[in-house]
């Protein structure tokens, strides 16, 4: 299964990283870290549509999505089009991402940056801070209760906003019990990779007031966004439909309801 392949490779990658650049060196380097940019305020608000635009060259379900993938140019287009934050895929084997994209993109935009990867070791939380991320994705399904709670605490200590991704009711309960206040509801099934927009509608019923929800996967047009906005959601993480567009600025503006 693709998920197991990714996690197996990730474990090996982390162990190699620890040998080359131990956690103690990261912690020492973090003393000179620039202040993080506020992520949650950038995507919050009851009326306006907020989009976390995703830099993603490839995915397991689609293969290569964009051949002319230039992170700097695309980030500048996101900024121009009115994105509220940027998600950056840093997983290398199946998404063709690079951790270095975080620092590269930070040079050309003031938007807050989310590191999107498969975080399975607290080493990656500290690494994300060192890479100049402002938020980090934590996937509830691949972490134990104790790991998720610890990673959320570590992220907040480092001024990283933890976006906890859920796919099922059990994932959501685990996230809330661990102290998550920013929940990403992913419409894509982790095992089959199929998308069902009703997943978010079902899980939203169980998200308490005061918790910010972000809809992930399957959003293709402004009508999809209005579907969720009617349920009180105003934040969306969107990647593929933007990355495959011939006109990134136009597509992002259309998604936000500003086609001109």
Image (spheres, rainbow, N blue to C red):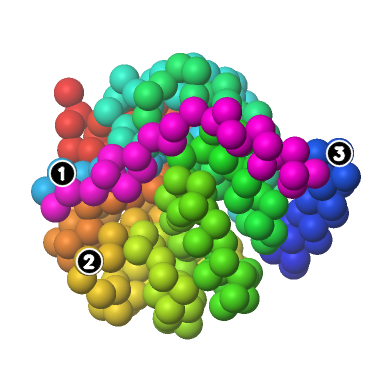
In the picture of the structure, the residue carrying the numbered disc 1 is: 48
Is mark 1 in CB contact (under 8 Å) with mark 2? no
Q: Residue at x 27, y 28 (%)?
A: 82
The percent position of residue 246, horizontal first and vertical second, equals 43, 25
Q: Residue at coordinates 26% horizontally, 44% vertically from top-left? A: 41
Q: Position of residue 252 (x, y in %)?
A: 32, 33
Q: Earlier in the sequence, mark 3 or mark 1?
A: 3
Which residue sits at x=21%, y=44%?
Answer: 49
Between 28 and 180, which is closer to the camera in this rendering? 28
How far apart are the two marked residues, 2 and 3, measured between alpha carbons? Answer: 42 Å
Mark 2 surroundings within 10 Å by alpha-carbon count, few (fewer than 14), some (14 through 19), many (20 or more) = few
Q: Which region is colored magenta?
A: 22-46
Secondary structure at badge 1 equals loop
Looking at the image, residue 94 lies above or below residue 69: below
Picture coordinates of residue 255, whole percent (x, y) = 27, 39
Point out which mark residue 124 bears: none
- Residue indicated by mark 2: 210
**Cα separation between marks 1 and 2:** 17 Å
Q: Residue at x 36, y 60 (%)?
A: 182
Give the residue number, with chain letter if any, for mark 3: 20
Residue 101 in view: yes
């Amino acid at each position: 299964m693709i998920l197991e392949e990714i996690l197996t490779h990730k474990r090996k990658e982390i162990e190699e990283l620890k040998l080359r650049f131990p956690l103690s060196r990261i912690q020492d380097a973090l003393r000179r870290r620039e202040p993080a940019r506020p992520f949650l305020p950038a995507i919050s608000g009851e009326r306006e549509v907020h989009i976390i635009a995703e830099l993603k060259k490839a995915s397991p379900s689609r293969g290569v999505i964009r051949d002319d993938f230039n992170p700097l140019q695309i980030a500048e287009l996101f900024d121009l089009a009115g994105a509220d934050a940027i998600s950056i895929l840093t997983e290398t084997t199946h998404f063709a991402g690079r951790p270095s994209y975080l620092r590269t993109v930070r040079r050309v935009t003031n938007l807050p940056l989310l590191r999107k990867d498969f975080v399975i070791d607290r080493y990656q939380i500290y690494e994300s801070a060192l890479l100049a991320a402002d938020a980090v994705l934590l996937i509830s399904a691949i972490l134990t209760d104790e790991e998720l709670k610890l990673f959320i605490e570590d992220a907040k200590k480092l001024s990283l906003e933890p976006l906890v991704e859920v796919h099922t009711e059990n994932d959501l309960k685990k996230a809330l019990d661990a102290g998550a206040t920013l929940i990403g509801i992913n419409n894509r099934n982790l095992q089959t990779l199929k998308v069902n927009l009703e997943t978010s509608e079902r899980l939203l019923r169980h998200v308490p007031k005061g918790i910010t929800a972000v809809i992930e996967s399957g959003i293709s047009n402004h009508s999809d966004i209005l579907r969720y906005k009617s349920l009180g959601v105003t934040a969306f993480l969107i990647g593929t439909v933007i990355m495959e567009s011939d006109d990134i600025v136009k597509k992002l503006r259309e998604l936000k309801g500003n086609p001109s």
